[in-house]
Amino acid sequence: STFWKWKKRFDELGVIGLENRSKRPKRIRKPETPPNIIEQIQKLRRLYPGYGKEKINILLDGNISSSTIGRIIKRYNMFYRAKKKPRGMDGAGGRNNASKT
């Protein structure tokens, strides 16, 4: 079947038809999430950076799926690092002190 595909392209376009073609899709579906929902997700994500897509979905009353919220978080790069906790002054360096007893 590959031979016949190449033969048809050669018959129609000549040698130029044998060049590699783009494998990119001709049409790509655009996300249809309303801008006001995206703004609400951004606002909630800034207020509660530790909340994931499921908790944000609960805060939005389940109007949109958790998967869509996750895609929006990823698309708009809404990942916020938690502030580092200061280390204790006990000198343990964050290790477990259970063995000192």
Image (spheres, rainbow, N blue to C red):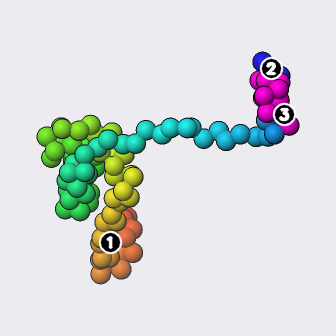
Q: Amino acid at mark 2?
A: Trp
| Disc 2 to disc 3, C-alpha distance | 14 Å
Residues packed near mark 1 inside 10 Å, few (<14), some (14 to 19) or many (20 plus): few
| Residue 84 circle label | 1
Q: Nearer the viewer, mark 2 or mark 1?
A: 2
Q: Amino acid at mark 1?
A: Lys
Provide residue 49's location: percent of width, then percent of height. 26, 60
Which residue is nearer to you in this view: 2 or 47? 2
Q: Tell me, yes or no, whether the highlighted magenta stretch contains residue 7.
A: yes
**According to the image, label 2 marks what residue?**
4
Q: Is residue 81 above or below residue 62?
A: below
Provide residue 2's location: percent of width, then percent of height. 79, 23
The residue tagged with tag 2: helix, strand or loop? helix
Residue at (13, 40) in percent of width and height: 61
- Look at the numbered discs 2 and 1 and tell me whether their residues touch, using CB distance below 8 Å: no
Q: Amino acid at mark 3?
A: Gly
Residue at (26, 37) in percent of width and height: 65
**According to the image, label 3 marks what residue?**
14
N-term mark: 2 or 1 = 2
Residues drawn in magenta: 4-15
Which residue is nearer to you in this view: 1 or 97? 1
